[in-house]
Image (cartoon, grey):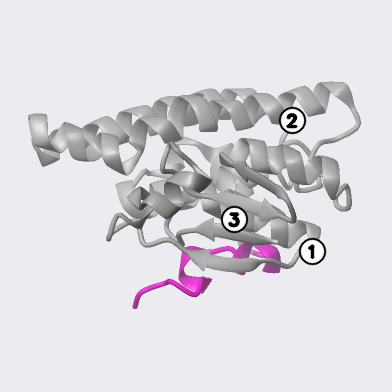
Amino acid sequence: MDMDTHNQSSCSWRVRFALNLKGISYEYKAVDLRKEEQYTAEFEKLNPMYFVPVLVDGDTMVSDSFAILLYLEEKYPQKALLPRDLRLKALNLQAASIISSSVQPLQMLNLLKYIEEKAGPEERLSWARYVIERGFQALEKLLENVATRYATGDEVCLADVFLAPQIGASTLRFQIDMVKFPTLRRIHESYKTLPEYTASLPESQPDATI
C-alpha cells in the first residue's frame, strides 16, 4: 500500500491518523504542492481533480479522503472507526461531512489564493476564519451533549479522525481561538496524548520542512 500525500494537507492528515489507528503500514509518497507537482501528467492519472491524498492498495486506487477512509473501514475492520450503534454512526458521519463538505473545501489553498488576488490578504484570512468558525459552531452544538473523552464517546471514531486535523490546522494557520468552542477544545487535548495522532502530525512526516 502507498499513499501520495503532502504533510500539510489536512485531508492527507486524516488518512494518516486513520492508518495509524488501524495499524496499517504504507509507503509515503510525497507530492510537493508548493511546486505544483499535483498538476503533472503522471499525477493526473491518479486523480484528475489534482488533490491529495491518493491511496493505492494493490490494484485498487482511491482518491478523496472520505472515500479512502470508508474503503479502509470496509477492507480493514480492525479498530473500527464507525460505531455499531446506528445513532452514533450517523453522528460520526454527520460530523465528518460538516468538515469535508462545509469547512475544509472553503478554506483550501487554491480558493484562498483566488480570494487574495481578487480582494487582498485581509479578506483571505477573514474568509477562512468565517467558514471555519461557522463549522465549529455547528460541530460544538452537535457534539456538546455526547462528547466525553472523544467526539462521540470514549473511543476514537471517524468524527475524531476528521476533527483532529481540522482543529490542528485551524489553530496554527488561521489562529482560531478554541476558547469559543470548549467541547472541541477539550477533545482536541485528548488527541494529543495518542501516539497515533502524534505520528500523523505534519512535522512528523518525511516531507516536513524545518
- Residue 24's place in the image compared with 117, above or below, is below
Label 3 with label 2: CB-CB less than 8 Å: no
- Magenta segment: 193-210
- The percent position of residue 187, horizontal first and vertical second, equals 63, 47
First reached walking from the N terminus: tag 2 or tag 1: 1
- Residue 102 painted magenta: no
The C terminus: image quadrant: bottom left
The residue tagged with tag 3: helix, strand or loop?
helix
Labelled disc at residue 23: 1
Could you tell me the amino acid type at mark 3?
Glu
Residue drawn 71% across the image and 36% down it:
147
First reached walking from the N terminus: tag 3 or tag 2: 2
How crowded pointer 2 is (Cα within 10 Å; few <14, some 14-19, many 20+) is rated as some
Give whichever of 188, 27 is nearer the camera. 27
Residue 93 visible, this orientation: yes
Could you tell me the amino acid type at mark 1?
Gly
Name the residue tied to disc 3: 189
Name the residue tied to disc 2: 146
Q: Is residue 123 left or right of residue 68?
A: left
The residue tagged with tag 2: helix, strand or loop?
loop
How crowded pointer 1 is (Cα within 10 Å; few <14, some 14-19, many 20+) is rated as few
Q: Main secondary structure of the magenta part?
A: loop
Could you tell me the amino acid type at mark 2?
Val
Label 3 with label 1: CB-CB less than 8 Å: no
Residue drawn 22% across the image and 33% down it:
126
- The percent position of residue 7, horizontal first and vertical second, equals 46, 62
First reached walking from the N terminus: tag 3 or tag 1: 1
The residue tagged with tag 1: helix, strand or loop?
loop
Give whichever of 33, 168 is nearer the camera. 33
